[in-house]
Amino acid sequence: MDPAEQLTTRFVGTLADLGLQHVALSPGSRNTPLSLAFLAEPRINAHTVLDERSGGFFALGIAKASGLPTAVVSTSGTAAANYHPAVIEAAASRVPLLVLTADRPPEIRGTGANQTIDQTKLYGDAVRLFHDVGVPDAEIASRAEVMALRAWTAAADLPAAPVHLNFPFREPFSTSAAPAAHSDVRHVPGYRSLPPEAIADLAARLSGRRVLVIAGGHHRPGFAAATAMLAGEAGLPVVADIQCRFPSPATINHGDLLATAGVLERLEPEIILRIGAVPTSKAIWTWLGSLGVEHLYLDDGDWRDPLGDVDAAFRGDPAAAMADLVGLVTAAPDDWLDLWREVDGAAGVAFQDALAQEAFPNEPAVAGALWQAAPSGSIVYAGSSMPIRDLDSFAGPPRGEISVLANRGASGIDGVLSSAAGAAASEGQRVVTLIGDVAALHDANALELIARLALPVTIVVVNNHGGGIFSFLPQAATVDKARFEAAFTTPHGRSLVQVAAGFGLPARSIDSEGELRSAVAADDGPLLLEVITDRAENVAVHERLRDAVRAAVGT
């Protein structure tokens, strides 16, 4: 057997033994040995993605939805460079990604050879592990199994991370491939638990005090149940991002609205327990920066504290830590949670009453209708700009049977549709995507992928003909309109219905809330729904809704 074929066959077979289920392949010649090895392995679903940038985010979406490492394979040159945005997002949002790039052999690097760039440490510090495999020979091929195990372990160990393996291949390429024999190689994951003395210390700090729990990001299974149990028995209000918000009497559903209404200044806690990523709500984050109270930080790795005001850091898996605290934290003062629930309920009523007075379509109503109509068991994938903010502020009560995913690690608008496609391909779940028009155009290649693979993705595009979020910035009032449009909102005048049709994806415009709800609730294949809104009116609607909440709970 050719050494390259032997290496890639055994490497791919070992990844399958370890549990790899999906790979995104992009076409190319130099990656022939890798691509054919993956296509020959029946235990791995190989998805062909025409564009490497889309392929990287497609694999990212699979890994986000499944929690398992997912692989991407490219040829050499700029093809590999196109994975970089997805690698950055994977690093920032702790997603296990196996980036496998084919390369030219070392003797022609730096010589001006065709389609040859320096791929050594191409992604810099964004990957946990970089390994240049070397031109395959018998000795390198003999290390295939441990090489795969090392890569898998580096990606899957908590907190998860992307890894990069670079495979230089010489021509000619063998075009024969067969599945590898099964092996007994194993990776046993572990979770970072706090030691008993740290749990006792944390419990003592929280006991009997006015604690506010603030949770951001996406957490592993078990976090919601453990946090709900602890918060319920200790009377601790929980302000959580839409990505990790859960149904519970202790859950505060309108944290962002309460923050913008000035309520948080009157319900000042004695201690903050912040868990995981930075909250989506800028109002909550600004309020946190104004506090002078004790700030505890619970996370399982890295350092996510841009405010720089953490008093004590507890480094452990949040799901495990919250479960360990159950039964150890004595209750807060009797009225602490009741006060939060009272103002949260009042804010919800005021918001809903005000929203009922607004004409459809408006962007908060679109977010709320999508949230309420999404099928049970589905994934809601939110764009990083206004969509995730509108869901976080206006979705309403959490739905425990729905998962929420977003590329909020680096918060780019690129790759959202591709990531949603990957989430749908992961386990075949229905995915409902809320995205803006600019982000949709940015990732339009994914429409071809969704249509070709007939993925169960419903895309709701809020089209305000430009970057609507910029209309909320101070620049909107200080820069003249012509330059503001050119530099910030960048109007395009395109209909996403027409764009989707060009890729063979069913699409239609939506004019009523009832029509939107019905279309989102349906479970009948890939579909794009376009809702046309106005940028200036959107700012006014947001302000009227927040004014209504201020009037109801601001005193």
Image: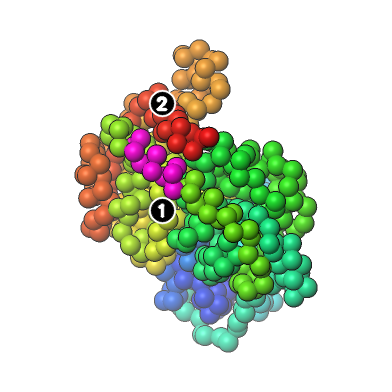
Residue 397: numbered disc: 1
Residue 263: numbered disc: none
In this view, the residue in front, 466 or 55, is 466
Residue 93 in view in this figure: no
Which quadrant of the rendered structure holds the N terminus?
A: bottom right
Disc 1 is placed on an element classified as loop
Q: Position of residue 509 (x, y in %)?
A: 24, 38
* Identity, as a three-letter code, of the amino acid under mark 1: Pro
Residue picked out by circle 2: 540
Residue 217, image quadrant: bottom right
* Identity, as a three-letter code, of the amino acid under mark 2: Ala
Q: Does the magenta stretch include residue 352?
A: yes
Mark 2 residue crowding within 10 angstroms, few (<14) / some (14–19) / many (20+): few
Q: Is residue 98 magenta?
A: no
In this view, the residue in front, 109 or 409, is 409
In this view, the residue in front, 492 or 196, is 196
Q: What stretch of residues is rendered in magenta?
A: 345-355
The secondary structure that dominates the magenta segment is helix
Q: What is the CA distance from the residue labelled 2 to the residue labelled 1?
A: 24 Å
Residue 386 in view in this figure: yes
Q: Position of residue 289 (x, y in %)?
A: 69, 40
Disc 2 is placed on an element classified as helix
In this view, the residue in front, 333 or 368, is 333
Q: Position of residue 330 (x, y in %)?
A: 66, 67
Q: Which of marks 2 and 1 is nearer the N terminus?
A: 1
Q: Where is residue 275 in the image (x, y as percent from the top left)?
A: 63, 57
Task: Describe residue 81's horizontal placement relative to residue 494 as left or right.
Answer: right
**Point 54% across, 26% down: residue:** 473
Task: Describe residue 298's horizontal placement relative to residue 414 as left or right.
Answer: right
Mark 1 residue crowding within 10 angstroms, few (<14) / some (14–19) / many (20+): some
**Point 47% across, 61% down: residue:** 248
